Image: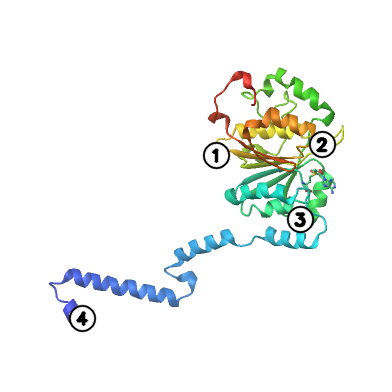
Amino acid sequence: MTIRYLLRPEKPVVFCLAIAGFIIGGVLISSFIQPADKSFLCSLAGVKARETADYATTPIQLQAIVHYATSRVTPQQSFPEINVTFGVLKTLSPCNFLVFGLGHDSLMWSSLNPHGTTLFLEEDPKWVQAVLKDAPTLHAQTVQYRTQLKEADYLLSTYKTEPHCSPNKAYLRGNNQCKLALTTLPDEVYDKEWDLIMIDAPRGYFPEAPGRMAAIFSAAVMARGRKGSGVTHVFLHDVDRKVEKAFAAEFLCRKYLVKSVGRLWHFEIPPASDRETHSGDWFC
Ligand SMILES: C[S@@+](CC[C@H](N)C(=O)[O-])C[C@H]1O[C@@H](n2cnc3c(N)ncnc32)[C@H](O)[C@@H]1O
């Protein structure tokens, strides 16, 4: 096919197609020989770069590798227990992960949720400082509890007399009437929907310790209030203890318990809007 043949007026369509072909071919060839940022294909390259970034190692993951490779102190949860949460993070991350307690496992949890939000709530300000000194990129906030472990039985037997603790009325921010509600958490905690909530704190092994009663109650309120699709995954550690067991049965509900490994229970709690409401059932 010659140029003269193409330029014949009776072949306008062929002419246009040929010109378009020359232009597209020229752009494609120049895009391959020009620097990538000027390329016609730069939008495609951008998509590819973003996909690669999703799988690229994050700084906190690199820090975690060095930390755990050089530390003799390991997390308190066992490998099979950690694996339960890891399994959920593998399917949901990047997601919103709220962790009660700052400890030797914190760098691990943050690293397993790259590009997600992992927030740690810790009762002891000195412990927050000590942990953040070595791992300043962790996102941790101090929390004040209004309960003591020794009040657990009393709180469990009397909370139903306080309407502000009832499942249909309970809220957290500023709910001072309900002693089980965590009322002064950072706004971020109330404003976000948490896909996973790990309860491995506060301390609950001596009478004056805060105990996990309020953390369990508040996790149940957050899970019930979920507006987004899907369930809230709640993980509770130390379920060999009486208080954790009793408060889990009351607020997280046996019917939502999906896994029990070692001293860890995993609940999948649907939002209250998905459930039939029976006024006599309270939380479960
Ligand atoms: C039962 S521990 C769980 C810690 C975490 N799961 C881990 O593997 O390290 C919960 C609480 O104990 C306290 N804690 C843990 N390790 C501590 C330490 N070395 N020094 C002071 N307090 C500590 C913190 O208040 C923390 O929130």
Whether the residue carrying mark 3 lies under 8 Å from ligand 1 is answered with no
Question: Could you tell me the amino acid type at mark 1?
Answer: Gly
User: Is residue 154 in view from this perspective?
Assistant: yes
Which labelled disc corresponds to residue 204?
2
Instruction: Depth check: give the residue in front, 96 or 112.
Output: 112
Secondary structure at numbered mark 1: loop
In the rendered view, does 220 fall on the left or right side of 75?
A: left
| Residue wearing tag 3 | 135
Question: Could you tell me the amino acid type at mark 2?
Answer: Gly
| Residue wearing tag 4 | 3
Query: For the residues marked 2 and 1, what is the alpha-carbon distance in whole angstroms?
Result: 31 Å
Query: For the residues marked 2 and 4, what is the alpha-carbon distance in whole angstroms?
Result: 87 Å
Q: Among all residues in the image, which is located at the extreme left?
A: 10
The structure residue drawn at horizontal position 63% and vertical position 54%, both measured from the top left corner, is 114
Marker count (numbered): 4
| Residue wearing tag 1 | 230
The structure residue drawn at horizontal position 15% and vertical position 72%, both measured from the top left corner, is 11
